[in-house]
Image: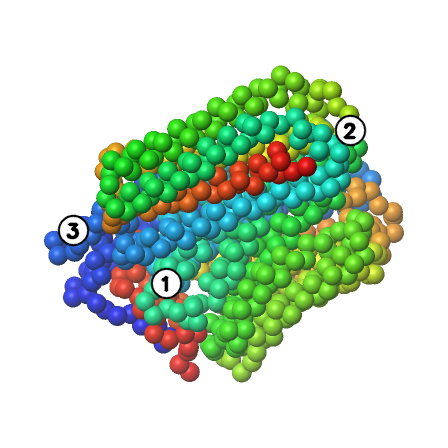
Amino acid sequence: MSTAIHGTSHGHSQDHHGHHDHPEYLQHHFSDAEQQVEASKLGMWLFLVTEVLLFGGLFVAFAAMRSLHYESFHEGHEHLSKTLGIINTVVLILSSFTMALGVHASQTNQKKKLINYLVVTLLCALTFLVIKYFEYSEKFHHGLLPGRYFTAHHENPHVSIFFGLYFLMTGLHGIHIIAGMSAIGWVLWRAIKGHFNSEYYTPVENVGLYWHLVDLVWIYLFPLLYLLP
Amino acid sequence: MSTKYVDSVSSVESTAHSENYINAKKGLMSWIVTLDHKRIGVMYLGSILFAFMLGGLMALLVRLELIAPGRTIMGPKTYNQVFTLHGAIMVFLFIIPSIPAALGNFMLPILLGAKDVAFPRLNLASYYIYVVGAIFCVASLLMGAADTGWTFYTPYSTTTGTSVVSMTLGAFILGFSSIFTGLNFIATIHKLRAPGMTWGKMPLFCWGMYATSVIQVIATPVLGITLLLLIMEKVLGVGIFDAKLGGDPVLYQHFFWFYSHPAVYIMILPGMAIISEIIPVFSHKTIFGYRAIALSSVAIAIIGFLVWGHHMFTSGQSELAGMIFSFLTFLVAIPSGIKVFNWVATMYKGSISLNTPMLYALAFLFLFTIGGLTGLFLGTLSVDVHLHDTYFVVAHFHYVMMGGTVIAFFGGLHYWWPKITGRMYSESLAKIACALTFIGFNVTFLTQFVLGSRGMPRRYYNYVDQFQPLHAFSTVGSWILGLGFLLMAFYLLASLKTGKKASDNPWGGVTFEWQTPSPPPEHNFNYVPVATHGPYEYKS
């Protein structure tokens, strides 16, 4: 890391010569902390755009198939448990709230609060997955599986397509929950090590943004799959 | 001089010129884990050139098989696999990463006056993701290569016994590499421009990269989900794309082209970006219509998202949709035309030196114009019904992709080779190779316009005897092309050993990269670069 550009007057160099005020978190190719923060925020938002488009494709597929096979999709959605869906929605909204509080705590130098909020967020995410596990195993048990593995009794011909999309959409979302948990875990570890303060909290903020997006996707998945008549 | 450096330092080290990004750190590990955008660019360059060789060999095999009707060197199934591999390797492993990830990675930060891209670690990750994706694609070769064509149309792709999953999984992974490069470039262009470099003073290469990156970031996730759906369709039999199971095959085509049409602009915009650098430098004249060229890149990126339906004129989409897509397709011709006219106007009354990069730029103008204009034939609904799925289409997209992008890529490679390697190649051999490429290309593909307009369908293994002379002529062209590339490989590799040392500014350019040593130092500049004027302001 101690690779100094030859002779700049802007304090870019990593080797400290005393008069340069160069915080440890600042990477060598940025000229100041503000530039680094702006770049990583822009990068995060662009990444969120790609996530929206990734799920967007699934939503379009769902819309197209639902309009082709309305009865089958209606029959399929009757098999889903609205109660569990609502509980999971509440759990995720709560986790978004605690995440937001965590970001605020990191901005205001409250290390202990930050750690607590991150732990609560992680627990919410875990609760969501546990509930999802029970939902999945119940579907597996009744043969409500995607495509050619669908064996349940059905009145309309294309319920299997509904469950194909149900597992694809909630499965991809579940993978995002796990990815989000790893990211929160990483931020938690860094928070315990005391990496964050009111000067530097970009990772907490960016992980927060990602977590809100994962929640937001569920906010659309839930009514689409569980509630839409 | 358009740019000048503010020497803000009291003691510039005198060793600065001998230390560069190649010799700054030693050993294999220093390359494998490097975060330097220049080294990552060079690693990309090696990888994509290897992919180009692989895809090129496939092309030679396809052409050889087609030299005569019936079986020549391979059976029909192998033939289907070989042309599929040719297409998939060339599109996903070569053209899409070619200019952005290899030359762009190396040059974009330098042209902006930055020390690196915004996210160096993400940049390295994108390279390794590319390698993993490439391994899946090439592994499919050994597991019974896919025989679907590079478009993987359903329901054939979900029912064939060949290794579609490995190939599409490879393309899915490659998509992430492409997204990360695009994301990195957008953040770099927004946030890391040198002091004084406003958007209006950015070299046009950066504008082209910006437009390309926007498409990469917005379109590629849709390809990702499409290929994921395709894989799930094959593995689980979900039935979204299979009419027999209640799905809709045209839905797959919509999904696929929603990415893959913008993707052709991911391919051509970087080519245009390079041409916009080469032409003013070798005409020794300010670019004509800077703003028009810059904004036409953005216009192409935007309109390019709205034309995907022209791949489905004969797939049973509604007539109204066909008309709208046809109209929007014609619209793309306007920004493309603006670029061509501005490049030609730049040359007007310039003092043109015909070095190799300029020869490639001229070849580009000629070939891209043919490719673009024949695109209008195909965008016309009534004409397309006749030309759809014939060799006319094959010739058209090869004129744009190869005559456009690949020729521009080689133009850029020759233009920046002295900067990247610090060595000059043999100018006379380079000119011969350029001529061979140009002649070989036209012999191969101009012929295919004739074949297509006479009704020769694309992808067919066999054909009626009357097409034989034209097919044979086209095959001979592919050999000339192959010879040209072989020669290029020879003198470029030779230049690394025996080429004379390149000066800092062999072509007389005024953008940032020509004001730093060849090859550049590890942090690109020995000074803090400051942009004071536009990128093409020459003193005559």
Say above or below: B290 vs A171.
below
Chain letter for the residue marked with disc 1 in the picture: B
Which mark is on residue A182?
none
Chain letter for the residue marked with disc 2 in the picture: A
Chain letter for the residue marked with disc 3 in the picture: A
Residue behind mark 1: B193
**Residue in the image at 65% along x and 18% along y:** A142
Q: CA distance from mark 2 to mark 3?
A: 71 Å
In the image: residue A225, left or right of residue B37: right
- Disc 3 residue type (three-letter): His
Please provide percent x and percent y for residue B49: 52, 47
- SS for dot 2: loop
Q: Nearer the viewer, mark 2 or mark 3?
A: 2
Which of the image's four quarters has the C terminus of chain A? top right
- Residue B352 in view here: no
- Residue B344 in view here: yes
Q: Are marks 1 and 3 on the same chain?
A: no
Which mark is on residue A16?
3
Contact (Cβ within 8 Å) of mark 2 with mark 3: no
- Disc 1 residue type (three-letter): Arg
Say above or below: B45 vs A150.
below
How is the protein colored in the picture? Answer: rainbow
- SS for dot 1: loop
The one nearer the camera, B297 or A214, is A214
In the image: residue A190, left or right of residue B477: left
Which of the image's four quarters has the N terminus of chain A? top left
Which mark is on residue A157?
2
**Residue in the image at 83% along x and 61% along y:** B382
Please provide percent x and percent y for residue B6: 26, 70
